[in-house]
Image (cartoon, grey):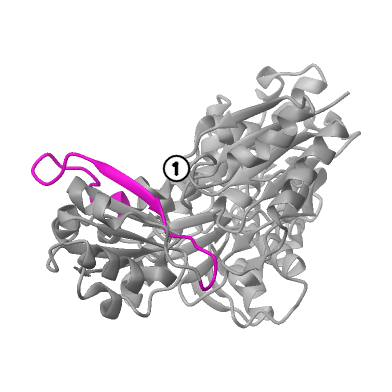
Amino acid sequence: MSGKVFLIGAGPSDAGLLTCKARDILQSAEVVVYDALVGEAILAMVPPEAECINVGKRARNHTRSQWQINEILLEEAQKGKRVVRLKGGDPFLFGRGGEELELLAKNNIPFEIVPGITSAIAVPAYNGIPVTHRDFCSSLHIITAHKKADEPLNIDFDALVRTKGTLVFLMGVTALPAICQGLLDAGMDPEMPAAVLHRGTSARQKRVVATVSTLPEAAAHMEAPSIIVVGKVCALSKEFAWAEQRPLFGNRYLVTRPRERAGVLASRLRDLGGEVVEFPTIELRALDGVSLDGLDDSTWLVLTSPSGVEIFFDLLKQQHKDVRSLAHLKVAALGSATAKELERHGILADLTPATYDARNLGVSLAAKLQPGDKVFIARAKQGSPELTEQLNSVPWADVQDVATYETVLTRPAILEPLELLDGRTWAVFTSASTVRGFAAAAGTEDLSQVNALCIGKQTEAQAKQYGMTTKTAAAATMDALVELALACAKEED
């Protein structure tokens, strides 16, 4: 029984431009065949269990030939697999998507097309260039400038100049001098505004705006991947530029929290203009056979993380109990995020320490314990011993420390963490375990090239053990971590 192939356009780079349909299909993929220009944040969405095949093609450097790619799609589908062909931009706009479908159609393999946002429109938009404007042009023309080595460009420059529309050349940065000369020879005004836009929609976005006559010299340093835009609309870039006005523009953040907990932090960093790659380095797994019988005669319940709260209430439900079974308890939460998760379940925490770490929670709770009190701690198997050390310092303390879940190291299926680093990339750590997971994913304990944003002192201490350059939030909260990111970005500027 044959499988199915989904030909998906991944857009220009920004993960926020991936369509909802593409995201949903990608998350259920069994095989992912991907190109070089797919953004890292999108590759990070690939399920860890999926088989990943890199067929990335750049100029004069092809991992696989086109016919080999076609054969791979056919072979994997014939195995009954759900295959995602992930292509940068839109698969039918100079993406050779039609060629890849021919062999599938010939062999009766089911397929679907998921269009993507093309760089021809998105990249100019992120650079403040509207490709159409009623005061300047009435048409848009998208041209591939890709050619074989030692062959002339097969472009009708006379026809393009006569349109008086906006011209967007894809895959043409190496042919920039020839393109500009062709337009000039066809009668284009030498003062016509023109631009080269590099890595648009990403943290590494750059642009050069000049004229058709001066652009080859002005943009001589620009490399692929870049697009060329020619037309009066390019003059609007200075007035309409918006992407670089955002406070975190130019910075990339590797968010290492568990995938299910990364959303809020990742969204806030993206909203402020940062490029975010969700790079989970740990996974939280509920343990089997956990008994909550000790709750019945306890006086205090202690929960130490939002995930721990979720897992605890799942356990209650599995054991045919609900919130009423907690009515006799006072509840302590390690931090504000844990307290908020408790509130979502209808419980207001009786105790939250001023400093959000295990030691201070232990100190705060120990000060409140009375003879006869019994403490039930539901937390990770690898929980900090500082909590129980502080509680056991009370002579009459009766402490039951129950592991309800464990922290397991993980990593995205495709990405190599150290390959994502540059001078303005930050690894964001919300616990010491995320630091250890990052080191495991990197395969080295020498992480001196990593710039780390840490949520607290324990996380910072772990990062320093690996040689990272660290910045630590003023408080162990997501708000403080975002403020730290803003402060560091301001220092860079």
- Relative to 301, say whether 94 is above or below: below
**Viewer-side residue, 302 vs 158:** 158
Q: Position of residue 2 (x, y in %)?
A: 84, 26
Task: Tell whether 330 sits left or right of 454.
Answer: right
Task: Tell whether 13 sits left or right of 299.
Answer: left
Q: Secondary structure at mark 1?
A: helix
Q: Please identify the quarter of the rendering in which residue 447 is found.
A: bottom right
Q: Is residue 410 magenta?
A: no
Q: Position of residue 21 (x, y in %)?
A: 55, 29
**Viewer-side residue, 73 vs 479:** 73
Which residue in the structure is indicated by mark 1? Answer: 17
Q: Position of residue 268 (x, y in %)?
A: 42, 48
- Relative to 256, say whether 152 is above or below: below
Task: Tell whether 387 sits left or right of 60.
Answer: right
Main secondary structure type of the part rendered in magenta: loop
Region of the chain picked out in magenta, as a range: 124-150
